């Protein structure tokens, strides 16, 4: 008898659709599209791309020029692809900063190398594992590989009709909101916090955000 998998926290297609609308309503970084249009080859303008990414997404890398040179080295001297590309970028960047910059590496790979690679940040990772619950979470020891496996499990179990960017958008916004809801003093995106506080005052003021979070107007916050 086949086991029917159920999420610890349900996720509806309507939430993903709302995430896509929310993302395209002013949160999508048009600068990345402009960079990719101007420099479509992943090997072009690597330093410029790294600097812009670090500035716009606040990945907090001080030695960004040196890190960009390490990214350049990985992309030019190896043929890594898929999740292993991100793991190798993390490994190479660690030689400069002595830290594991998974968020920067995943974002760089997604925006400038392969858009099918999901964006890993702490809030998205937290929300993803909350949806899956302990039983469905991957036990893969490599962090980005584990995140990708969990990402694909969520898509498979829910049967979602979405691309990587849409599910990324949902996980990021929902992750920030629900963690902030439980830990109101925890630092989150200032722009998002304004929208979250508006939502708390009235779901009618933020209908797309409410739909993304699965909060009905009749339910309140």
Image (cartoon, rainbow, N blue to C red):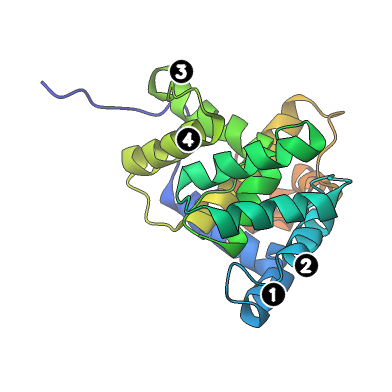
Label 2 vs label 1, nearer the camera: 2
Q: First in sequence, mark 4 or 2: give its number.
A: 2
Q: First in sequence, mark 1 or 3: give its number.
A: 1
Q: First in sequence, mark 4 or 1: give its number.
A: 1
Q: Can you identify the residue that label 2 sits on?
A: 48
Q: Give the image location of residue 58, x and y in percent.
A: 82, 49
Instruction: State if disc 3 and disc 1 touch (CB < 8 Å).
Output: no
Residue at the location (67% across, 82% down)? 38
Label 4 and label 2: CA atoms lie apart by: 27 Å
Q: Which mark is residue 145?
A: 4
Label 2 and label 3: CA atoms lie apart by: 40 Å
Q: Which of 189 and 137 is in front in this view?
A: 137
Q: Can you identify the residue that label 3 sits on?
A: 134
Dot 2, how many residues are within 10 Å of its Cα: few (below 14), some (14-19), or many (20+)? Answer: few
Label 2 and label 1: CA atoms lie apart by: 9 Å
Q: Nearer the viewer, residue 137 or 10?
A: 137
Label 4 and label 1: CA atoms lie apart by: 27 Å
Q: Residue 35 carries which label?
A: 1
Q: What element carries label 1?
A: helix
Q: The C terminus lies in which quarter of the figure?
A: top right
Res. 137 image quadrant:
top left
Q: Give the image location of residue 47, x and y in percent.
A: 76, 63
């Amino acid at each position: 008898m086949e086991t029917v998998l159920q999420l610890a926290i349900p996720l509806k297609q309507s939430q993903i659709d709302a995430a896509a609308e929310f993302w395209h309503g002013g949160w999508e970084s048009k600068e990345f599209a402009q960079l990719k249009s101007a420099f479509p080859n992943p090997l072009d303008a690597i330093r410029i791309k790294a600097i812009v990414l670090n500035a716009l997404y606040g990945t907090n890398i001080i030695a960004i020029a040196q890190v960009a040179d390490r990214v350049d080295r990985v992309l030019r001297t190896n043929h890594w692809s898929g999740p292993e590309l991100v793991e190798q970028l993390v490994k190479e960047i660690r030689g400069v900063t002595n830290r594991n910059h998974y968020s920067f590496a995943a974002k760089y790979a997604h925006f400038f190398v392969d858009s099918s690679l999901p964006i890993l940040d702490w809030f998205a990772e937290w929300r993803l594992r909350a949806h899956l619950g302990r039983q469905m979470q991957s036990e893969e020891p490599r962090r980005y590989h584990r995140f990708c496996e969990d990402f694909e499990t969520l898509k498979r179990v829910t049967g979602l009709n979405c691309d990587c960017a849409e599910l990324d958008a949902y996980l990021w916004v929902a992750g920030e909101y629900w963690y902030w809801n439980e830990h109101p003093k925890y630092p989150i995106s200032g722009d998002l916090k304004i929208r979250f506080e508006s939502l708390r005052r009235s779901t009618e003021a933020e209908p797309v955000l409410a739909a993304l979070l699965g909060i009905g107007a009749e339910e309140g916050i």
